Amino acid sequence: MQPFHALVIGASSTIAQAAINQFEEDSDCFGVYAISRSVQGKLKEGKTHWIECDNSEMRIREVCQHLKASSGTITKVLICNGILHNEDMMPEKKLEDINAMQLEATFYANTVVPMLWLSQLLPVLKGNEATQVALLSARIGSISDNKSGGWYSYRASKAALNMLIKTSSIEYARRGKNVKLIAFHPGTTDTPLSKPFQHSVPEGKLFTAEFVANQLLSIMETVTMDNEAAFLDWNNQAIDW
Ligand SMILES: NC(=O)c1ccc[n+]([C@@H]2O[C@H](COP(=O)([O-])OP(=O)(O)OC[C@H]3O[C@@H](n4cnc5c(N)ncnc54)[C@H](OP(=O)(O)O)[C@@H]3O)[C@@H](O)[C@H]2O)c1
């Protein structure tokens, strides 16, 4: 494999951290840019450079401007931002649970932030090298697969993310031909995000972040570079949009 730099956004996510650890071990990986809302003095760890970013449009633009110096060498990108619940909200079970605060907060973290990054990254990513961008989505964002309802904000925010990925792939095909966009479903993974719901996960179906990161990085290595967005699960199976 060609030596490369990795870019990991939402880098304090449990799945992101597991991927960063694997990049650290990979001798083909020259360096990792890890973007997080809080870097808590970590700045440089191994070959990982931490960059603080509040995900505002202005700051994303500044960070992408900085990353342009490594343009052509950043060929693996993970965008991991996402929320499902916090101290003020849990996924909605019924229509009466719907509220503007939850819809807005969930769409902001799950849809707006990843899309702001994707929109600003084009100059950093376009070039001659095959480049894969994985955006952490979820099977629950599949409109055709929605049989059980509920979880309105999260479900809709991931469906909207998927639409933005698909739409971006059409423009990237013209303006960043060597970039493959992947909406990735990690499966239920043992992280703070899934913690309150892990009791209902069937035996053997709760994955470690290490397993999921390993699956994702091997999928990125072998994925077909066809200028089309893919919606793939942890087992490299296509999910219907
Ligand atoms: N765990 C699962 O079972 C599962 C299943 C399906 C899909 N996913 C998806 O996988 C991705 C990673 O999740 P995870 O399980 O690793 O969760 P996690 O450990 O809770 O990490 C989520 C990350 O999202 C970023 N984030 C949180 N709130 C945010 C906000 N308000 N605005 C912008 N960014 C925010 C944070 O990154 P920084 O603090 O570093 O900026 C945080 O570390 C998410 O998109 C999630 O929806 C997870």
Image (cartoon, helix red, strand yellow):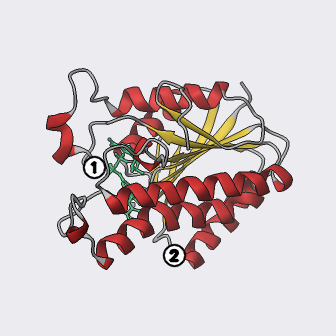
User: Farthest left residue?
Assistant: 199
Side of 222 relative to 134 (left or right): right
Residue 224 coordinates in the image, percent (x, y): 72, 29
Amino acid on which the number 1 mark rests in the picture: Leu
Residue 40 shows in the view: no
**Residue 225 tag number:** none
Residue 138 coordinates in the image, percent (x, y): 43, 45
Residue 201 coordinates in the image, percent (x, y): 22, 32
Image-quadrant location for residue 190: top left
Label 2 vs label 1: CA separation?
Answer: 23 Å
Amino acid on which the number 2 mark rests in the picture: Ser
Residue 129 shows in the view: yes
Q: Nearer the viewer, mark 2 or mark 1?
A: 1
Q: Secondary structure at mark 2?
A: loop
- Taking depth in this image into account, of 91 and 8 the one nearest to the observer is 91
- Residue at 55 percent across and 52 percent down: it is 162
Image-quadrant location for residue 191: top left
Q: Circle 2 is placed at which residue position?
A: 56
Q: Is mark 1 within 8 Å of ligand 1?
A: yes
Q: Quadrant of the C terminus?
A: top right
Image-quadrant location for residue 105: bottom left
**Residue 193 tag number:** 1
Residue 221 coordinates in the image, percent (x, y): 64, 27
